[in-house]
Amino acid sequence: MSRKSQFSLDISKWINESKQDINIVTRAAALKLFSDIVYDTPVDTGHLAYNWQASVSSPPSGTREGTDKDKSGTISQIESEVNKYDYSKNNQIWLTNNVEYAMKIEYGGSKIKAPKGMVRINIRRWNDTVKKAQAKK
């Protein structure tokens, strides 16, 4: 094999490994962010927590009927969706909550409050979340 061919193979291998690293870090950081948001969601009936929905490529619409007071089912659904992310497909990872009172809870306008928010507080930690995911890779 010529030096030029070997160099091309080495570059291709590096590109593929880099894409895999991006997938690993992106998935880990998104899962941590989304899980933290769910865990910071106050629970009365568990309906709000149950309606955190993740997807790849397009945001989920509508709400789901049900509850998840311990949040484990919601986290499992989120993890399953986040693991579908693939950098090479140029897609995005979405987390939505379409329950009509989600914004009210986020901004403390209810008896069941998240005084610092569910989303806002965790978005502030995003840079640290990504750095930790990179360090674990």
Image (tube, grey):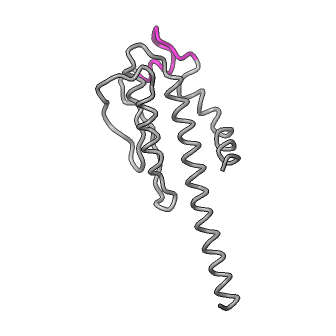
Q: What type of secondary structure mainly makes up the magenta span?
A: loop
In the rendered view, does 30 fall on the left or right side of 111?
A: right
Q: Residue at x 70, y 88 (%)?
A: 3
Q: Nearer the viewer, residue 24 or 60?
A: 24
Q: Is residue 73 above or below residue 87?
A: above
Residue 59, position as x, y percentages in the image: 39, 42
Residue interval drawn in magenta = 102-115
The quadrant the N terminus occupies is bottom right
- The residue at the far top in this view is 111
In the rendered view, does 108 fall on the left or right side of 7?
A: left
Residue 43 lies within the magenta run: no
Q: Residue at x 67, y 46 (%)?
A: 136
Residue 107 lies within the magenta run: yes
Quadrant of res 62:
top left
Residue 125, position as x, y percentages in the image: 65, 33
Q: Is residue 51 above or below residue 46?
A: below
Residue 79, position as x, y percentages in the image: 47, 41
Q: Residue at x 57, y 49 (%)?
A: 26
Count of all numbered marks drawn on residues in the image = 0
- The residue at the far left in this view is 65
Quadrant of res 95:
top left
Q: Residue at x 64, y 44 (%)?
A: 133
Residue 102, position as x, y percentages in the image: 42, 23
